[in-house]
Image (spheres, grey):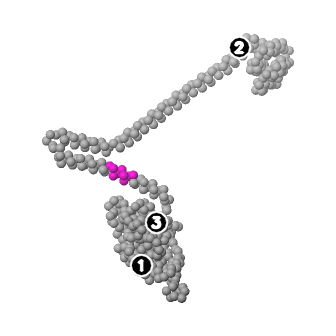
């Protein structure tokens, strides 16, 4: 039998796949290595039975498929392990075929059950996915419908009210004893118009509020402390448009002229080419460091022929303003610390710290009509290294403008003759200007106080304002 199986394996090997060939080899191993077979062959009594069985297996092996041959080998292994040899004799062709058919049927049943189970699972999965999809579509449609309904309701509520009032008007007009020009009709019509205007006003306010919030967030990083700073030329430049001398007052001493400084710094004025010449353009600056400091300083030298004393009498004006907001319901007092420069030989020099307070709160900003200024520090002497502080009150719910003004310190003024004539000479001027604040973050902006970014950006962007109180509105 082994030879026949060997031969069959050889025959099949020519056209078999590697998997089939390995399976045939395993089948041969199961037959040849069984000690039970050797023991049975040595038994004379059953040799003929074994020979007959082997012959039958040989016959079957000739025309068997690889799977059938493997199954026959397994059948032989099961048969020779039986304790009763007579059972081997009983194993007829029919029985062997029955075993083979049973095995094939079993495999077929398994394949059918597998296919049936997979089909059931696939169909169940499709149905489940379909239900989920239908449910999701239904929910999305319902949400979309509700959204549209709510939007429509919101958009139409004012019109509904107005239509209702119009209906009342028509009802009144339908009554014969109510004249068409009745005051009642007029009052109702006026009320309808007022409601319509109120709706429009609220829409505009909401739009402006959203725009301001978006601009604030886009322009300034969280935690940043912006403020405005610039250096006015005054008559110090002498030449050119926009210079001025005494027109806007003595800033260090005249409190009635303080608002002019913020007008120029924030661009909230109606001037064309008057008074608006800057030596260092007004710009958005930022308080620096963990303590909160900003210090500017510059040394300037100039020479002019003739008696051009404007440089001496009307020095550069360094201006800076910080908008501080009180978010609490109590007044808060803070000491503002600063440094700078000042010159006393001219009454248009000096230095000063001022606070501008609106006449209403931020919650009623549309009612803010003026800014009231107070001088909290004044300096009229000459000093190139000025340092001081002033106490500022920030009322509950309000934003105040803290404004620091410093002037140039004149450190040299010489006259050099030119030629033989005494009238030919040159004036040489040397001056130093400084402006600075410090400890703003650590000592001023404590709980309840913060830089008002909205008003700082509005002042910086100069949206065509005519008065400083409009910065708060």
Q: Could you tell me how far apart the alpha carbons at marks 1 and 3 are, in whole angstroms?
A: 25 Å
Task: Give the foreground label among 3 and 2.
Answer: 3
Q: Are marks 3 and 2 in contact (CB under 8 Å)?
A: no
Please, what secondary structure does the residue beneath circle 3 have? Answer: strand
For marks 1 and 3 on the same chain, the one whose residue lies earlier in the sequence: 3
Residue found 17% across the figure and 46% down from its top: 182
Q: Quadrant of the N terminus?
A: top right
Residue 112, image x and y in percent? 63, 21
Q: Badge 3 local density, few (<14 within 10 Å), some, or many (20+)? A: many
Q: Are marks 1 and 2 in contact (CB under 8 Å)?
A: no
Q: Which residue is mark 3?
A: 227
- The spot of residue 368 in percent (x, y) is 33, 63
Q: For the residue labelled by badge 1, is the local secondary structure a helix, a strand or a loop?
A: loop
Q: Residue furthest front?
A: 420
Above or below residue 189? Residue 333 is below
Q: Which residues are magenta?
A: 199-207
Q: Tell me which numbered mark, 3 or 2, is placed earlier along the sequence.
A: 2
The overriding secondary structure of the stretch rendered in magenta is: helix
- Total of numbered circles in the picture? 3
- Quadrant of the rendered structure where residue 72 is? top right
Circle 2 SS class: helix
Residue occupied by mark 1: 348
Q: Position of residue 230 (x, y in %)?
A: 47, 69
Q: Residue 2's quadrant in the figure?
A: top right
Marks 1 and 2: which is nearer the front?
1
The image's mark for residue 98 is 2
- Residue 204 vs 224, above or below: the answer is above
């Amino acid at each position: 039998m082994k030879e026949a199986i060997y031969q069959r394996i050889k025959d099949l090997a020519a056209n078999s796949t590697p998997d089939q060939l390995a399976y045939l080899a395993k089948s041969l191993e199961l037959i040849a290595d069984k000690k039970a077979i050797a023991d049975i062959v040595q038994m004379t009594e059953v040799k003929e039975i074994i020979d007959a069985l082997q012959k039958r297996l040989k016959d079957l092996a000739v025309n068997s498929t690889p799977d059938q041959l493997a199954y026959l080998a397994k059948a032989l292994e099961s048969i020779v392990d039986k304790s009763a040899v007579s059972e081997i004799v009983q194993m007829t062709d029919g029985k062997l075929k029955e075993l083979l058919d049973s095995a094939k049927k079993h495999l077929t049943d398994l394949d059918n059950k597998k296919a049936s189970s997979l089909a059931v699972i696939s169909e169940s999965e499709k149905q489940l996915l379909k239900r989920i999809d239908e449910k999701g579509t239904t929910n999305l449609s319902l949400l979309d419908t509700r959204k549209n309904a709510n939007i429509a309701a919101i958009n139409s509520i004012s019109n509904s009210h107005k239509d209702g009032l119009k209906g009342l008007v028509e009802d009144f007009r339908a009554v014969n004893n109510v004249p068409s020009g009745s005051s009642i009709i007029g009052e109702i019509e006026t009320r309808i118009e007022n409601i319509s205007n109120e709706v429009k006003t609220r829409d505009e306010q909401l739009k402006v509020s959203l725009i301001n919030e978006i601009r604030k967030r886009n322009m300034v990083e969280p935690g940043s402390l912006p403020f405005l700073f610039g250096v006015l030329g005054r008559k110090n430049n002498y030449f050119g448009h926009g210079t001025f001398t005494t027109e806007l007052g003595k800033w260090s001493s005249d409190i009635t002229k303080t608002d002019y400084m913020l007008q120029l710094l924030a661009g909230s004025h109606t001037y064309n080419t008057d008074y608006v010449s800057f030596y260092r353009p007004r710009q958005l600056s930022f308080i620096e460091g963990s303590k909160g400091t900003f210090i500017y300083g510059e040394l300037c030298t100039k020479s002019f022929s003739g008696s051009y004393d404007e440089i001496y009498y009307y020095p550069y004006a360094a201006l800076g303003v910080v908008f501080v907001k009180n978010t609490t319901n109590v007044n808060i007092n803070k000491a503002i610390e600063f440094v700078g420069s000042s010159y006393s030989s001219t009454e248009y020099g000096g230095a000063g710290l001022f606070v501008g307070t609106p006449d209403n709160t931020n919650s009623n900003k549309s009612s803010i009509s003026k800014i009231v200024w107070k001088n909290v520090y004044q300096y009229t002497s000459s000093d190139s290294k000025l340092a001081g502080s002033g106490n500022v009150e920030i009322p509950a719910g309000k934003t105040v403008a803290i404004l620091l003004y410093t002037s140039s310190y004149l450190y040299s003024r010489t006259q050099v003759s030119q030629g033989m004539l005494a009238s030919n000479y040159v004036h040489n001027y040397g001056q130093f200007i400084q402006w600075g604040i410090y400890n703003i973050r650590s000592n001023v902006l404590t709980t309840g106080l913060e830089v008002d970014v909205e008003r700082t950006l509005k002042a910086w962007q100069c949206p065509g304002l005519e008065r400083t109180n409009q910065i708060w509105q």
